[in-house]
Image: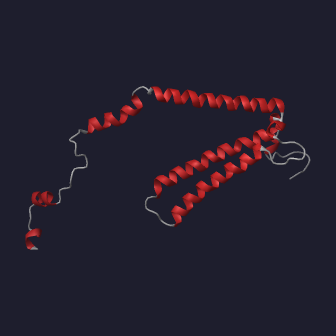
Amino acid sequence: MADVIMQSPEAAAERIKRAPLVTSNRSMSWITDHVASVTEKSAPKWWWIAFTMSASLAMVSVFCIGYLISTGVGVWGLNHPVGWAWDITNFVFWIGIGHAGTLISAILFLTRQKWRTSINRAAEAMTLFAVVCAGIFPAVHVGRIWMVWFLAPVPNSNAIW
């Protein structure tokens, strides 16, 4: 035990030397260039194809909402005897997905899982995106989009509050 205490600092440093984290003898600048090249080089062809398909789908949804506004909520199957149409059903679905993300995050937190960080981030992002998706449906469900301000509690002279 005495020989461990009396060692020189160089001998102690040699004794506790760690294994290198990067074993391929790459320099830090090579690693930086390799990581940064993902965002600095031009997008590959498959990305542009996927982007074009996504943008086309987004334009279809904009067209469909425009058709809904010009035609009316009967397009969704909301008629006099039908109280639940496609919009409210989807609203409930997306709110449920948002609750699922919160539940996943809460269960992992309550059980004190050490590996929960990345899954919590994904679950909370899922919750936020689901709430944004759900928020679209009450706005277009009013039928007359120019009357959507009725969804907000605005004080008025009728003393409804």
Asked if residue 118 lies left or right of residue 145, the reply is left
Question: In the displayed structure, does residue 71 sit left or right of residue 131?
Answer: right
Q: How far across and down, in percent of the image, does residue 83 sit?
A: 84, 48
Q: Is residue 159 above or below residue 49?
A: below
- Give percent across and percent down for residue 94: 67, 48
- Counting from the top left corner in percent of width and height, residue 65 is at 74, 33
Task: Locate residue 52: give its quadrant.
Answer: top right
Residue 76 falls left or right of residue 27: right
Give the residue displayed 79% in from the left and 33% down from the top. Answer: 68
Total tally of numbered discs in the picture: 0
| Residue at the (54%, 29%) spot, across then down | 51
Q: Residue at x 12, y 59 (%)?
A: 9
Q: 144 or 63: nearer the eye?
A: 63
Eyeballing the image, is 113 above or below 87?
below
To which quarter of the image does residue 139 belong?
A: top right
Along the viewing direction, whichever of 113 and 55 lies nearer the viewer: 55
